[in-house]
Amino acid sequence: MFVGHYTEVPEKDTGFEGVTIRWLVSPKLGAKNFAMRYFVLRKNSEIPIHQHDWEHEIFIMRGEGVITNGKEEYHVKAGNFLYVPPNEPHGYKALTDTFEFLCIIPAKKEAIPEDEWA
């Protein structure tokens, strides 16, 4: 078992201005099936629409934002949860000072950076 606090995990740049990620659970800790990430988007920052061949499970922790699949937009806030099926386009935009969410993905080589592997 491993117990940690998210503030003890390094906050890393994502390549998108105003967006950071913390890899809370990854294969580095021994996770073989799933990875858990903590995203923070600063006000008006965004992750553009993209897609992958794996699903996402998301839980909004703080703030408000917009999630889109390119056709529909959903205004979400703390307490909302989402399921993004494999290959569905998805993008995120922060509406408040910070928009923070947990995102769970499968522990697949193509989804996780090399430094998060054991």
Image (tube, rainbow, N blue to C red):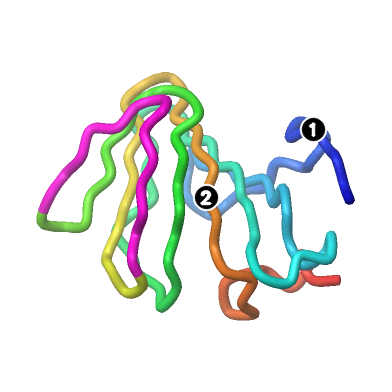
Give me the residue at 74% from left, 35% from top.
6
Instruction: Please indicate whether residue 68 sits to the left or right of residue 23 in the image.
Output: left
Q: In the image, what residue type sits under mark 2?
A: Cys
Q: Earlier in the sequence, mark 2 or mark 1?
A: 1
Q: In x, y percent, where is residue 52?
A: 40, 73
Measuring from the top left, give residue 44's x and y in whole percent: 34, 31
Q: Quadrant of residue 102?
A: top right
The answer to which quarter of the image holds residue 74 is top left
The residue that disc 2 covers is 103
Depth check: 42 or 22 in front?
22
* Quarter of the C terminus within the rendering: bottom right
Farthest front residue? 1
- Mark 1 is on which residue type? His
For residue 54, which numbered disc appears in the image?
none
- The relative height of residue 25 versus residue 50 in the rendered view (above or below) is above
Residue 79's x, y, as percent?
41, 27
Residue shown at 55% from the left, 55% from the top:
104
Q: Which mark is residue 5?
A: 1
| Lateral position of residue 59 relative to residue 66, left or right | right
